Image: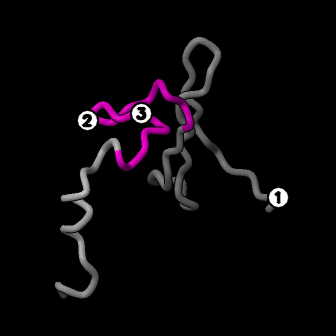
């Protein structure tokens, strides 16, 4: 929307791994985004891994709307 703001890009070997964007007050992080398959989570899942490969149908059935406060 025409507003400039600081951001941190993390790169390796010429490809972008992460983009770290601050909150408006520039005191804390708003969001960290990635589209690089080089970035994984603590469980080893990569960008593009399907939910079916991460969760079994038993995990999907556990979450039901309206059962808890």
**Residue at the (38%, 49%) spot, across then down:** 51
Circle 1 SS class: loop
Q: 44 or 57, which lies in front?
A: 57
Circle 2 SS class: loop
Q: Which quadrant would residue 3 be assigned to in this image?
A: bottom right
Magenta-highlighted stretch: main secondary structure? Answer: loop
Separation of marks 2 and 1 at Cα, in angstroms: 38 Å
Separation of marks 3 and 2 at Cα, in angstroms: 9 Å
- Which residue occupies the extreme right position in the image? 2
Residue 44 covered by magenta stretch: yes
> From what the image shows, is residue 37 above or below residue 53?
above
Circle 3 SS class: loop
Q: Is residue 25 left or right of residue 62?
A: right
Q: Are marks 2 and 1 in contact (CB under 8 Å)?
A: no
The residue range painted magenta reads 35-52
Q: Quadrant of the C terminus?
A: bottom left
Residue 57 covered by magenta stretch: no
Q: Which label is found at residue 31?
A: none
Q: Position of residue 27 (x, y in %)?
A: 47, 54
Q: For the residues carrying marks 3 and 1, which lies nearer the camera in this image? A: 3
N-terminal-most mark, 3 or 1:
1
N-terminal-most mark, 2 or 1:
1
**Residue at the (46%, 51%) spot, across then down:** 29
Q: Position of residue 32 (x, y in %)?
A: 49, 45
Q: Which label is found at residue 43?
A: 2
Q: Which label is found at residue 46?
A: 3
Q: Are marks 3 and 2 in contact (CB under 8 Å)?
A: no
């Amino acid at each position: 929307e025409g507003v400039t703001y600081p951001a941190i890009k993390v790169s390796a070997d010429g490809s972008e791994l992460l983009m770290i964007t601050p909150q408006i007050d520039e005191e804390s992080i708003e969001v960290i985004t990635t589209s690089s398959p080089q970035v994984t989570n603590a469980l080893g899942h990569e960008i593009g891994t399907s939910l079916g490969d991460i969760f079994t149908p038993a995990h999907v059935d556990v979450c039901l709307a309206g059962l808890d406060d």
